[in-house]
Image: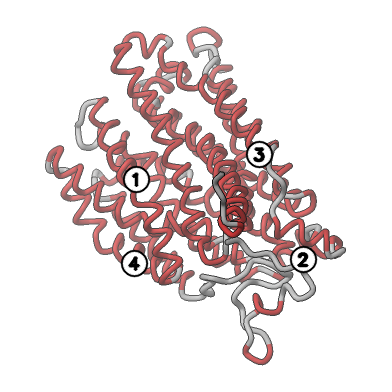
Amino acid sequence: MSYVQPSTTQDAQSRAPIRRAMAASAIGNATEWFDYGIYSYGLTYISAALFPGSTAQATLFALATFAISFLVRPLGGLFWGPLGDRLGRKHVLALTIIIMSMATLLVGVLPSYASIGLWAPASLVALRMIQGFSTGGEYGGAATFMAEYAPDHKRGFCGSFLEFGTLAGFSLGAFLMLGCSVLLGNDAMHAWGWRLPFLVAAPLGLIGLYLRSKMEDTPVFRECAEASEREHHAGLPLRELFASYWKPLLQLGGLVVALNVVNYVLLAYMPTFMKKELGMSDNLSLLLPLIGMLSMMVLLPFAGALSDRIGRKKVWWLSLVGIFVAAVPMFTLMSHGIAGALIGLGVLGLLYVPQLASISAMFPAMFPTQARYAGMAIAYNISTSIFGGTAPMVTDWLIGRTGSTLVPAYYMMGACAVGAIALLFVTETVGCSLRGREIPGVKVGGGARREDVAHEGLPEHRHA
């Protein structure tokens, strides 16, 4: 009869909830970005089916509709964030994923502009707004959920899988749209084929709902209730949140400017850029960014683990400075054929990975438990709505006005400069506990750090 060491059994049991939390968090992020992937890669077909006017006008309208969903995200953050701090992370995340996936599904069954006229784009705008409202609570909650479950010394590694879900969802949506385009042909895609990838959102949402419904809420959140301190941890009024935590709100907002301008230019806008500005074919302009994303996915866990070893701020400095220096040379290289485009996109993606891999560990740690979901959701979504989702539309408009294909590079450089200013004031939180009512990593009287005293009186909880 085989004998299992008790410590080995305990280690496996302690790791199982972490793995489930990683899966439950990542599937929601994947569902969100699946929508962005099929919308970005199906933009030509969607604009032709649902919008009036010339191809250029319809494309601009479709990009504007993509941006509209981001303008609603702060409202979602204001609604879902405080709710997640009061009721728990799990319940809110179960609602957001099902709303998000159903809105994506309905886009795929919308009647065309030829059938119902202006009701087609109006309906698309309404569904994008619903999707944006639900997404306003999705990422902040998923990152909080993941960060509060992860061991303190492996938060970067564990959190990187949330971003793995980001790229996996985007890539799945993009591959589906590309695969349909190759198999069905241009005529069938314009007629009905572009709708097929949207229908996959429903099964993804149901899988995510199942995974999240089977999870307990995070240990950090539950400890607050067990210590009979629920009144302190049931969430803050918004006025108190802004009054008490305006500094981390501004810092996070500045970091997100850099994060999401680079993100949406490299991921969401690149297929349109390669087709319109570099003259590549439809399929090639879709395929090259996908190769870059798959390469980034492989590197994410390594970059997350690196942030656990050397700190979040160091990997962010590496990324911000690297992109600032390389942006213009790499976009110049992209205009010199397929090989140049692949190299340029690959280098920028590689430099972006350290940012992307560490945000799920870094951002939630900027707030205490009772304000974490709300602070993360509000700051992240306000900044994303202004600078992230609008990046493809603004970049496309500026290229049209200036005629320069280097506009995306300059836009990314400006965003990285904003992120660098914010990073100067951010506290390093690598290895810090997320428990307690104080901001992790901030020094208190006597030189002790807050994570050393904030969970005083709370039950000890460590992961193997």
Instruction: Give how far apart the Cα atoms at labels 3 and 1 are.
Output: 30 Å
Q: Is residue 13 visible?
A: yes
Outermost residue on the front side: it is 1
> Which residue carries the number 2 mark?
240
- Labels 1 and 4: the sequence-earlier one: 1
Q: Earlier in the sequence, mark 4 or mark 2?
A: 2
Point 67% across, 45% down: residue: 75
- Position of the N terminus, as image quadrant, is top right
Query: Can you give x and y, in whole percent of width and height, for residue 148 in the image?
Result: 63, 58
Residue 266 circle label: 1
| Lower position in the chain sequence, tag 3 or tag 2 | 3
Q: Residues within 10 Å of mark 4 (few under 14, many from 20)?
A: some
Q: Nearer the viewer, residue 310 or 394?
A: 310
Alpha carbon separation for disc pair 3 and 2: 30 Å
Where, by quadrant of the figure, is residue 297 drawn? top left
Callout 2 secondary element = helix
Residue 24: name its quadrant.
top right
Labels 4 & 2 near each other (Cβ < 8 A)? no
Q: Amino acid at mark 3?
A: Arg
Compute the Cα span from label 4 to label 3: 35 Å
Which comes before the other along the chain, label 3 or label 1?
3
Query: Looking at the image, do the residues carrying marks 1 and 4 touch, with CB atoms under 8 Å apart?
Result: no
Dot placed on the residue nearer the N-terminal end, 4 or 3: 3
CA gap, disc 4 and disc 2: 35 Å
User: Can you identify the residue that label 3 sits on?
Assistant: 212
- Which one is in front, 28 or 198? 28
How far is the residue under mark 1 from the one under mark 4?
18 Å
Q: Nearer the viewer, mark 1 or mark 4?
A: 4
Disc 1 crowd, CA 10 A, few/some/many (<14, 14-19, 20+): many
Q: Amino acid at mark 4?
A: Leu
Contact between labelled residues 3 and 4, with CB atoms less than 8 Å apart: no
